[in-house]
Each structure stands twice: as structure tokens, then as C-alpha cells.
């Protein structure tokens, strides 16, 4: 198995970021060939490099009251929200082993999300010119990555639980007036996030193991 | 003299935007040091320095758009 899997459970965003950077170093220095980090975050708003502050609708005071911190980070993209119930998928991969093609990697992350959703019976799609995955008019998975020396970090966020979705109204996700949905909302039933992880790991192995083995 | 060129980034990408330089013009850089961070849709990436020397010229500043194949900067190797 060429992938080291790390399941961090529910973890503070900054701690997970630190962890990613440690794993990144291990991959860069060839101690590890590649890794996949799974986790969920406590509520947090992150600003990618293309973020505009006006895409945060809530006031600083309101965010403070709700205990939601705001971080500027190294990934691409605009503003987004993360919270428990959203499965974060951070592949630390050296694209030199795949192909040095940034859009291709974005499409592969979308494909992974679409495959997992399809295993739950949900038909999802890409949108021309946009990165991410939609079910009908609503967005279900978001992507923002960073690449250093062709090694990736950050990655994919898939909305699984529905309870935390209202927090997206604090922002304009990705700088757009889009409605977010979740796997639970689509299925109209409770989904155990552990089941999603199992399926996602299988799909990930199926897609990447051939290239990496 | 070594030119720092924006490499091929993948199918369908022909440009990127400079986010920031890790060094200023005139500073000494080592081969493989992170030189500049750039962004494309949903991704940030870096260009490492292709050689050791002085970062003598920077042609694109933060916020500028660079086309694939264009020269971003020049490194003058130490004598």
C-alpha cells in the first residue's frame, strides 16, 4: 500500500494544517511516498489566496460570538467555511508521479467526490468553468489546493451531515451566491461519516494505487 | 545568468498570477529556495530558484499575470 492514511478525527484547523505540513516534509524528503489525511474541523472560516473580505457576510463580532475563527491560508480559491460533518480530504501527493498538471489534479479530486456520492446513489456533476461538485443547483463538494515542488496539500471538502450547513450563510462560498447541500440532505436520512470514509478510501485506492504502486 | 520561466502547468492553463516573492531584487538566493508563489484557479504553487546567485531582476510584481513560457526573473550566478 503506497499510501499512508491518517485519520485525525475532528481536529482544530490549525493543528491539522501543522500536521499536513509535517507530512508534506516527509513526502518531500522521501520518508513517505504519499499520504492521505482525513479529518473534520471545528467551525472555521478560511480565506484562500484569491479571497475577498467582502465575501464574509457575518460581522467580526458575530463570528467572535459564535466562536468561529478566521484564517488566511496558502491554498487557492476564495473564502470558505468548514465545520464538523464536512469530510476533509487532504492528499499529500507528488504530482511528478502522476502528471504535472494542475487542472488534471483538480478534476481527479472532483472525480473522487463524484464516485463516493455515486456509491451512495447520488448523481453529482461538475460545472463548466468552475471547480467543485454540484447536485442539481446546489454545491456539495469544494476544492482548494496548494502545490509546492509539485507536492500537493489541502484538498477536498465534501458536505456529509446537514446540521452544520446553515453556517455557510455566514459567507459567500467561493465568492458566489451558491446554496450548499450535503449527502444527508440528498438522501434525507442520517449518514455515518465513518461509512463515507470507508468508501472514499476504497475509491481513492482504486484510482491512485495503479499509478503509485 | 539563469532565467526563471513560468513552466507548463497543465492542459488548459496558459497563465498564472503572482501572489508574492519570497525574496526582493538584489538578494542572494540558493538553488531550490522558494522564489515566488503564484496562483491559478483554486491552486497556489511555487517556483523554486533554478540556481544560486543574486536575484538581479524581477519582471512581474504581486498581482501581475504571467503567461506560460514568460521570464519572471533573472538570477546572476556569483562569480
Image (cartoon, coloured by chain):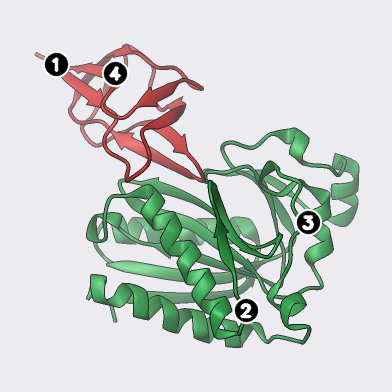
Chain colours: A green, B red
Look at mark 4 in the image and give the residue it sits on: B73
Measured Cα–Cα span from mark 3 to mark 1: 50 Å
Query: Do badges 4 and 3 share one subunit?
Result: no
SS state under label 1:
loop
**Mark 3 vs 2, N-terminal side:** 2
Q: Looking at the picture, how far across and down is residue B34, in whole percent?
A: 33, 35
- Horizontal side, residue A87 vs residue B42: left or right: right
Q: Looking at the picture, how far across and down is residue A89, in whole percent?
A: 52, 67
Q: Vertically, is A50 above or below A13? A: above
Look at mark 1 in the image and give the residue it sits on: B1
Residue A122: mark: 2
Residue A168: mark: 3
Measured Cα–Cα span from mark 4 to mark 3: 41 Å
SS state under label 3:
helix
* Chain to which mark 4 belongs: B
Query: Do badges 3 and 2 share one subunit?
Result: yes
Measured Cα–Cα span from mark 1 to mark 2: 55 Å
Measured Cα–Cα span from mark 3 to mark 2: 22 Å
SS state under label 4:
strand
Q: Looking at the picture, how far across and down is residue B36, in whole percent?
A: 38, 29
Measured Cα–Cα span from mark 4 to mark 1: 10 Å
Picture residue at 78% right of the left edge, 83% below the top: A188
Query: Do badges 3 and 1 share one subunit?
Result: no
Amino acid at each position: 500500500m503506497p499510501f499512508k492514511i491518517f485519520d485525525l478525527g475532528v481536529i482544530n484547523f490549525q493543528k491539522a494544517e501543522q500536521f499536513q505540513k509535517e507530512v508534506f516534509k516527509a513526502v518531500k524528503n522521501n520518508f513517505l511516498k504519499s499520504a492521505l489525511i482525513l479529518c473534520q474541523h471545528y467551525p472555521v472560516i478560511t480565506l484562500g489566496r484569491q479571497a475577498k473580505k467582502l465575501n464574509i457576510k457575518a460581522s467580526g463580532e458575530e463570528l467572535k460570538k459564535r466562536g468561529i475563527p478566521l484564517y488566511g491560508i496558502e491554498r487557492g480559491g476564495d473564502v470558505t467555511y468548514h465545520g464538523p460533518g464536512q469530510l476533509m480530504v487532504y492528499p499529500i501527493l507528488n504530482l511528478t508521479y502522476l502528471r504535472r498538471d494542475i487542472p488534471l489534479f483538480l478534476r481527479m479530486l472532483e472525480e473522487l467526490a463524484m464516485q463516493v456520492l455515486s456509491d451512495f446513489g447520488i448523481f453529482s456533476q461538475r460545472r463548466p468553468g468552475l471547480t467543485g461538485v454540484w447536485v442539481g443547483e446546489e454545491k456539495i463538494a469544494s476544492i482548494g489546493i496548494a502545490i509546492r515542488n509539485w507536492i500537493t496539500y489541502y484538498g477536498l471538502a465534501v458536505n456529509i451531515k446537514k446540521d452544520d450547513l446553515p453556517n455557510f450563510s455566514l459567507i459567500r462560498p467561493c465568492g458566489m451566491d451558491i446554496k450548499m447541500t450535503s449527502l444527508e440532505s440528498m438522501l434525507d436520512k442520517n449518514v455515518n461519516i465513518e461509512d463515507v470514509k470507508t468508501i472514499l478510501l476504497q475509491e481513492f485506492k482504486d484510482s491512485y494505487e495503479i499509478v503509485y504502486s | 545568468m539563469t532565467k526563471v520561466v513560468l513552466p507548463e502547468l497543465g492542459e488548459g492553463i496558459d497563465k498564472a498570477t503572482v501572489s508574492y516573492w519570497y525574496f526582493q531584487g538584489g538578494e542572494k538566493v540558493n538553488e531550490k529556495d522558494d522564489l515566488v508563489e503564484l496562483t491559478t484557479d483554486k491552486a497556489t504553487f511555487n517556483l523554486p530558484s533554478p540556481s544560486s546567485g543574486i536575484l538581479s531582476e524581477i519582471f512581474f510584481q504581486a498581482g501581475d499575470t504571467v503567461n506560460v513560457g514568460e521570464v519572471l526573473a533573472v538570477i546572476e550566478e556569483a562569480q
